[in-house]
Amino acid sequence: MASFTLVITEAPYGRERAYTALRFALTALVDGHKVRLFLVQDGVLVAKKNQDPAEFPNHLEYLSQTIEEGAEVKVCAPCAKARGLASEDLLQGVSLATMHDLINWSADSDHVLTF
């Protein structure tokens, strides 16, 4: 099986890139692949707790499912701070990280995809 690092750069609910990344992650996990998600730039908002969209798929539910299925999820700490997010604002199971983490994951992955 392959290992994937998925980099999400866009906020939820604007375009469908974050949604597509989460669907990809869940499908890969169900198929037995290793998945890591790194949220950077506006993508950090995907992990913000208490999202409750009325007319869109709930990205937070998808992210929770990926964590339950075994995905590791990290958020760029400087990006989160710039958007007023602290670790307590993030979904349980998501940790703050740096570019060093993304570099290490990328070097250790079979595939790196950016959404």
Image: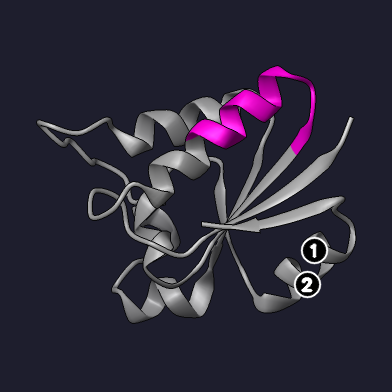
**Few, some or many C-alpha atoms within 10 Å of disc 2 (few <14, some 14-19, many ≥20)?**
few
Task: Identify the residue at image location x=79%, y=30%.
Answer: 33
**Residue that numbered label 1 is attached to:** 106
Between 22 and 96, the one lying in front of the other is: 22
Residue 103, label in figure: 2
Q: Which residues are magenta?
A: 23-34
What residue type is disc 2 on?
A: Ile
16 on left or right of 72: left
- Residue 48 spot, x, y in % from top left: 33, 51
User: Is 33 included in the stretch rendered in magenta?
Assistant: yes
Task: Identify the residue at image location x=54%, y=70%.
Answer: 76
Q: Secondary structure at mark 1?
A: helix
- Inspect this view and state whether residue 70 appears: yes
What residue type is disc 1 on?
A: Ser
- Residue 95 quadrant: bottom right
Task: Identify the residue at image location x=34%, y=46%.
Answer: 16
- Residue 41 spot, x, y in % from top left: 43, 73
Residue 41, label in figure: none
Q: Secondary structure at mark 2?
A: helix
Q: Is residue 77 above or below residue 24?
A: below
59 on left or right of 24: left
Q: Is residue 80 above or below residue 115?
A: below
Outermost residue on the top side: it is 30
Are the residues at dot 1 and dot 2 in contact (C-beta closer than 8 Å)? yes
102 on left or right of 62: right
Between 84 and 62, the one lying in front of the other is: 62
